[in-house]
Image: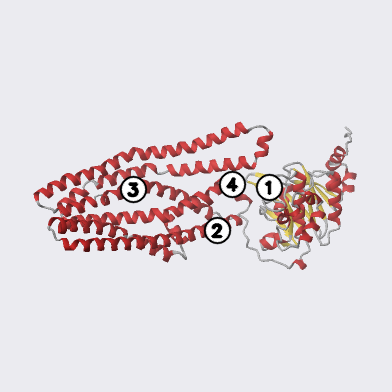
Amino acid sequence: MKEIKWLWSLLKGYRAKYVLSFAISLTTPVFAVINPYLTGRMVDDVFTNHITTTLVYYIVLMLILRFTRTCMDYGAVALVESSSLGMLYELRMKLYRHLQKQDMNFFGSISGGDLMTILTSDVDMVRHNLVFVFRQIFSSALLYVIAAGFYFWINWKFALCMIAVTPFIFFASIVYRNKIKGIYKELRQRLSKLNSDARENIEGNRVVKAFANEPLESEKFDDKSQSFRDQNLYAQKVWLKYYPIIDGLTQTNAVVTIIIGGLFLMSGEITPGDLISFTSLSWAVTAPFQMLGQLFNDLQRFFASAGKIMSILDEEPKVQNTGSYSPAKEGFRGKVEFRNVSFSFESNKVLDNISFTIPAGKTCALMGETGSGKTLIADLLSRFYDVDEGQVLVDGVDVRDWDLNALRSHMGITTQEVFLFSDTVDSNIAYGDYDMSADEVQYFANAAAARFINEMPDGYATIVGERGVGLSGGQKQRIALARALAVKPGILILDDTTSAVDMETEKYIQQQLKQLDFNCSKLIIAQRISSVRDADQILMLENGSISECGSHSELLERQGVYYSLWKIQAGEELVA
C-alpha cells in the first residue's frame, strides 16, 4: 500500500530504533505463553505429583521471566516513543516548510481549518498507528500462532475445539472492515469543516459582534458540530452491530474451554496442569480477533489522514523558484516594466495586454474601480502569481528568472488587508530584519507617522493582539508601512496604505516618502487622489486595461475618468 511505503520513507533516520522496538514487542507473545505453561507444569508437579521441591524453582523462574518481560517492554516503549516522536517532528516540519513554499493559488483553494486539521489530528493519527496499531496487528497475529501451536503441542483434539470459533470471529471482523470503508474519510471531512467554521468565527469575532449575530454563528457551529457528532455516532453504531457477534463468539470460546476441557480431564486425555494452561491462555486465540474491530477503525482513520497529508505534500506550487538571478543590494536599481501582460482567474480575464514602465527611483500610482486588477499588478510584480501572457521585468530581467527570495528581498510590501503578528510592536516592524537596532525601528516608525506607539502601555514592547486586535485600522496601516520601510526596499509597494488615516497624517507620510535616505521605486495603489497626485505617473485601470496614463496635471487636462473622479472627490458637481 502506498500509505505504508510513504510512512516507511518518513522513518528514515529512525528506522533502526523502530525496527528494534518492533522486534522486542514481538517477544511479548512468547512470554504470554511461557507463564501459563509453567503454571500448568507447577500444578502437575507440585499439587498433583507432590514434588514440592520444585515449587521454589517455578516461582523464581516465573519472577525472572516477569522481570525480563518488564525490562523489555520498557525498552520497546522507550525506542518506539523516541522514533515516533522524531518522525512526528520531521513530518510536521516537512508539512510546514511545504506550505511555506505554496503560492496564492494553493491557499485560495483550501481552507485554513483543513490545514490545521492536517497539521494536528491527521499527523497525530499517523503516529498513533505507528506506535500502537501496526505493532498490535503483528503482535496479535504472532500471539495467535504461538498460542495455537502450544495448544496442538499439548493436545491436538482440544486445540481444534479451542480454535474452531476463531474463523467466525475473523469473518465477522472482515465484514465489519468492509462496512466502515469511507465512513472515516467522511468523518475527517466533517472535522475539517468544524475546525474551519470555528477558526473563521474567531477571526471574524468583531464583525459577528458588530451585527449582534452571535446566535446565528452559534447555530452554524452547532450544525457543524452535530454533523460531526452524527457521523461519529454512525461509525459507532456500525461497530455496535458487529461487536455483540464478535464478543459473543469470544465468550463462547471460554465456555468451550471449560466444558470440553472438563470432559478431556475426566477421560484422562489431559492433566489438571494442561487444563490450567489451556484456561489461562484461552484469551490468546480470541483476543486478537476481538481487537480487530478497533484496529480496523484506527487503520481506516490512518488511511484517511495519510491520504490527505500525501495529497498536500504532492501539491506543487504553480509559482516555482527556478530562477537564479540574484544581484547584490548595491547593484539593484528598481526599474519595473510590464510588457503585454495578461492574466485570468480560471475563465475570468482580469488583466488584458497591460504595458507600462516605472523608471528606477520613480513613483507610479494605480487607480480604478474595485476589481479592476490594481492589487493583481502588485501580486504579479511580487510574483505571488505568474502571468498568463507577456512579461514582468525588474531591472530588465523577467521575474521568473530571478531567485524568488532575492526578488522579494528587494521589495517592501504593505498589503490591502493588514496582517500583524501576535508579537511586540518592535518585532512586527523589524520582521524583515530581526537584527535591526531599536533606534532604526523608531526611525521608521516615525517615518510612518506611528508616533502613537510611544503612548501605548509598554511602548515598542507592547504585545499586539492576534491580527492586530486592539489597534485601529489607521494604526495597523502605519505599523505595516514602518515594517515595509524598515527593509530599505528597492521597490516599495503600497496597497491602499493610507486609506484609514486622516488627511494630515497622510500628508506627513507622503512627505517622509519623498525624503527616504535610500533609492526606492514606488508603486502606490489608492482610491484617493490625495494619495497619488504627486506620483510621476498615474495609471487608470478600467476593465483590465489601462484607460488613461499621465501625471496629475496631464490627466486633469484630458478631462477623462481621472478628471471626473477628481471633481467628485473635490466636492464639485459634474457638468452634464
Ranked by sequence position, the earlier of labels 1 and 3 is 3
Crowding at label 2, few (<14), some or many (≥20) Cα neighbours within 10 Å? few
- Give me the residue at 46% from left, 64% from top: 12
Q: Could you tell which of marks 3 and 4 lies nearer the N-terminus? A: 4
Query: Counting residues from the N terminus, which is met first, the one under dot 2 or under dot 1?
Result: 2
Q: Residues within 10 Å of mark 4 (few under 14, many from 20)?
A: some
Three-letter code, disc 4: Gly
Residue 73 placement (x, y as % from top left): 36, 60
Q: Quadrant of the N terminus?
A: bottom left
Indicate how the structure is coloured in the image.
Answer: secondary structure
Could you classify mark 3 by the number of other residues whose Cα lies within 10 Å: few (under 14), some (14-19), or many (20 or more)?
some
Looking at the image, tell me whether mark 4 or mark 2 is earlier in sequence order.
2
Report the disc number at residue 291: 3
The CA distance from mark 1 to mark 3 is 48 Å
- Quarter that holds the C terminus: top right
Q: Which label sits in the foreground, 4 or 1? A: 1
- Seen from the viewer's position, the closer of residues 335 and 53 is 53
Q: Which residue is mark 1?
A: 465
Q: What distance separates the C-alpha of mark 4 from that of mark 2?
A: 17 Å
Q: Which mark is residue 93?
A: 2
Q: CA distance from mark 2 to mark 3?
A: 33 Å
Q: Amino acid at mark 1?
A: Gly
**Which residue was labeled with disc 4?**
112
Q: In this view of the protein, can residue 162 be seen by the observer?
A: yes
Q: Position of residue 459 (x, y in %)?
A: 76, 52
